[in-house]
Image: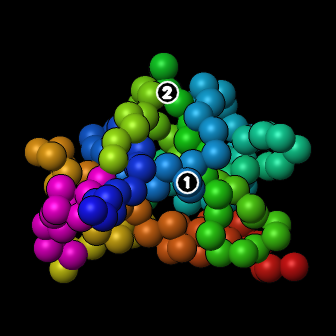
Amino acid sequence: MSMPNEIRALMITVTNGRVLLPNAAVTEILSFSTPDAVEDAPAWLLGRMRWRGWRVPLVSFSRLAGLASKEAERNAKVTVVKAMGGNPRMPYLAIMAQGFPRLTNISQDALIVTGEEEFKSPGVMHTVILRDDSAIVPDLFQIEALINDALNLAPA
């Protein structure tokens, strides 16, 4: 008897939406503290925060994807994610979150891609429904590329 293929994921609440990330991509959940400002940064790049010796860019996914124009900072959390793009100068990025994420198991038949991809916002790979919850699967590669552009971080 074969086991169903399931992926462990985190459902992260962001301002006016939810983001679904593979559990393996998430490194740590922290309390929000004001990041160091980045000069001339786009509104969705909130700054850089210090974490384990790195200066990690903090992204408002809600602003980037057009879900919200403002972020609530009170009781906010920060989700530190492993960067996928292989830039040694940016091995991590952080996403602003509201509250603690929820761990969930995803089986193939529980996840429905809603097909709203024709009006894709920046940073959005898919819009999905998981057990009656709608969520966004972020395009981490695109988000990383946008951060690299904003910070002028050429790969070393």
Local SS, label 1: helix
- Name the residue at 46% across, 55% down: 22
Q: Amino acid at mark 2?
A: Ala
Coordinates of residue 130 in the picture (x, y in percent):
20, 51
Mark 2, residue position = 76
Q: Quadrant of residue 104?
A: top left
Question: Mark 1 is on which residue type?
Answer: Ala
Q: Is residue 81 left or right of residue 116?
A: right
For this rendering, which residue is in front, 2 or 148?
2
Q: Say whether marks 1 and 2 touch (CB < 8 Å).
A: no
Task: Judge from the rendering whether residue 135 lies leftward or rightward of residue 150; answer left or right.
Answer: left
Percent from the top left, x then y, of residue 9? 41, 49
* Percent of width and height locating residue 42: 55, 59
Q: Is residue 70 left or right of residue 27?
A: left
- Residue at image position (18%, 80%) is 118
Can see residue 62? no
Q: Which residue is mark 1?
A: 24
| Residue 33 part of the magenta-drawn span | no
In the image, the segment drawn in magenta is 106-117
Q: Dot 1: within a 10 Å radius of its alpha carbon, few (fewer than 14), some, or many (20 or more) residues?
A: few
- Using the rendered view, name the quadrant where residue 136 is placed: bottom left
Residue furthest out toward the front: 1
Sequence-earlier tag: 1 or 2? 1
Using the image, determine if residue 102 lies above or below residue 56.
above
Task: Examine the rendered structure and indicate whether residue 76 appears above or below residue 141.
Answer: above
Q: Is residue 110 covered in magenta? A: yes
